[in-house]
Image (cartoon, grey):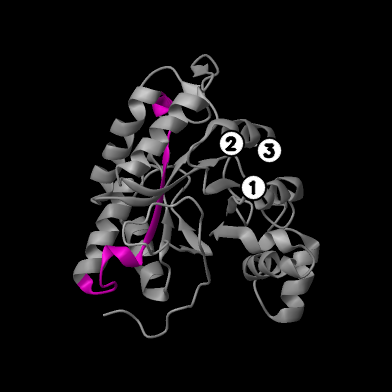
Amino acid sequence: MASDNIISIPELVPRGTSTHDHVAPKIPRLGFGTATYPLGGSDTMKESILHAIELGYRHFDTAPMYQTEECLGEAIAEALSLGLIRSRHELFITSKLWSCDAHKDRVLPAIKNTLKKLRLEYIDLYLIHWPVALKQPGNYDFPFDKNEIVALDFSSVWEAMEECQKLGLTKSIGVSNLSCKKLESLLLGAKIPPAVNQVEMNPVWQQKKLREFCVEKGILIMAYSPLGAKGTPWGTDRVMECEVLKEIANAKGKSVAQTAQIESQNTHNIDHTIDKVIMLS
């Protein structure tokens, strides 16, 4: 049975979502990211997801490149069988279109493959992972081989993303790692605007200009690596080793990780745009 000691996580409502029952899906403000280093799912990851559900997490983020879609799907099925959740509808699941599938004719097969791995009929949010495409299908290598990179045709790929939403395969569509300039260009031709832009953001990399732009355009920000992803090739120790955060943590009797999350949420006292940010832990 579900634990009685679950946390209560605030929610945000994305615009441009598909709602057959006329109830807009809500995105929990705190999500559980499944990207690991080294990449890949594991029994430990599955147990971590189940424990997170017991604690009250309802938002989970995955991607083909992370190789954790199957693991998350197994955890969701087990959570249902154990009674940790009453139905799949209690969860908000985000996945992404990897760059090798960022071609108009590959988008629909890609989301169907994601759904198969997750054992779901739909996901809540589907994002274009990076604003580039790769030539060869099935290439999930990261960092990218520069010889494989080609320009992403945003117009045709976004049209295919819109079709995924119209078919009910995803409730919302969005992007990841897009600058203000690329968002502006995408918005010019989009019939359905992106609900979310998922980007790196943390207390020492606050991206104020991008946040302000997204708020102006009605796009929610989803922040990945809010603690800096220390210990990964792409990460930094600037958050966890920040002296200011350490001082605040000591004064409040909290960990640096707790303080970084709290300070990010409290920034709305001086900057209203942080109210539109969803954080992936």
Q: Which region shows up in magenta? A: 82-103
The CA distance from mark 1 to mark 2 is 9 Å
Q: Is residue 198 above or below residue 90?
A: above
Residue placed under numbered mark 1 in the picture: 217
Q: Nearer the viewer, residue 174 or 21?
A: 21
Q: Is residue 148 above or below residue 92?
A: above
Residue placed under numbered mark 3 in the picture: 180
Q: Amino acid at mark 1?
A: Lys
**Who's the residue at 53% across and 26% down the image?**
132
Q: Is residue 30 above or below residue 1?
A: above
Using residue 39 as the reference point, say whether residue 215 is left or right of it: right
Res. 42 in view: no
Q: Amino acid at mark 2?
A: Leu
* The magenta stretch spans residue 94: yes
Q: Are marks 1 and 2 in contact (CB under 8 Å)?
A: yes
Residue at the farthest left position: 81
Mark 2 or 3, closer to the camera: 2
Q: Is residue 205 above or below residue 32?
A: above
Query: Callout 2: 10 Å neighbours few (<14), some, many (20+)?
Result: some
**Who's the residue at 72% across and 80% down the image?**
252
Rendering quarter of residue 63: top left
Rendering quarter of residue 137: top left
Q: Earlier in the sequence, mark 2 or mark 3?
A: 3
Q: Which mark is residue 187?
A: 2
Q: Residue 131 location in percent, x, y? A: 55, 30
